[in-house]
Amino acid sequence: MKKIWNKGSLSDRIREYQSHDQLEDLATDYKENVVDELLRYDDAYGFGFVIAAWIAPRLQEFRQISPGLTYPYHFFIKYGHQKAEEIWTTYMEEMQFAFDTVAGLNKGELDRQIKEGLCTKREIEKRVKKGLHLFAEYLQELEY
């Protein structure tokens, strides 16, 4: 694995990487190189960002390995298989959007959409809030 460790906070380094694969390399490298320092002050200051950058690639992987298989059972009881799968897929997309946005993984695309008038910052903030609330509400349902 290529070493990508540099001085500076984890938050600063994560912002440099756009793909989930690079974030995985960064996370591994961070663990290997920071033995005595569990949490730097500047990482704690942007702790939501650090957590989002950790969750985003794992949530994406979960979505890829479990499409249509993992919706909450009470969705099935209430809506039946097809509608439960549609609702759960929408919820998972909202969760992914929230973590990708907080981690800055989709920043370029969102900046473009705002510039072109396709959405506003307020709409993005509302969508992020919704995704984070869904994640909190359904955390225990995220099983394969």
Image (cartoon, grey):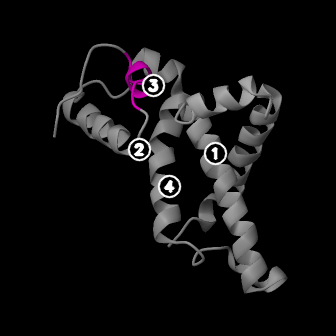
Question: Which mark is first along the chain, 3 or 2?
Answer: 3
Label located before the other in sequence (4 or 2): 2
Q: Residues within 10 Å of mark 2 (few under 14, many from 20)?
A: some
Q: Which residue is mark 4?
A: 60
Measuring from the top left, give residue 37's x and y in whole percent.
29, 24
- In contact (CB < 8 Å): disc 4 and disc 2: yes
Q: Quick check: 124 above or below 42?
A: below
Q: Are marks 1 and 4 in contact (CB under 8 Å)?
A: no
Q: CA distance from mark 4 to mark 3?
A: 18 Å
Instruction: Identify the residue position indicated by label 3 in the image.
Output: 15
Q: Which mark is residue 20?
A: 2
Q: Which residue is mark 1?
A: 97
Quarter of the image where the N terminus is located: top left
Residue 17 position, x and y percent, is 39, 30
Q: Which amino acid does the dot numbered 2 rest on?
A: His
The kind of secondary structure element at disc 4 is helix
Residue under the image location 33 percent in, 29 percent down: 38
Question: Percent position (x, y) of residue 4?
Answer: 23, 27
Disc 3 on helix, strand or loop?
helix
For the point 46% across and 69% down, which residue is it?
A: 65
Q: Earlier in the sequence, mark 3 or mark 1?
A: 3
Q: CA distance from mark 1 to mark 4?
A: 10 Å
Looking at the image, which is closer to me, 52 or 117?
117
3 lies left or right of 30: left
Secondary structure, mark 2, is helix
Mark 2 to mark 3: distance in Å? 12 Å
| Residue type, label 3 | Arg
Circle 4: residue type: Gln
The residue at the point 80 percent across, 28 percent down is: 117
Task: Tell me the residue at 71%/59% (across/down).
Answer: 91
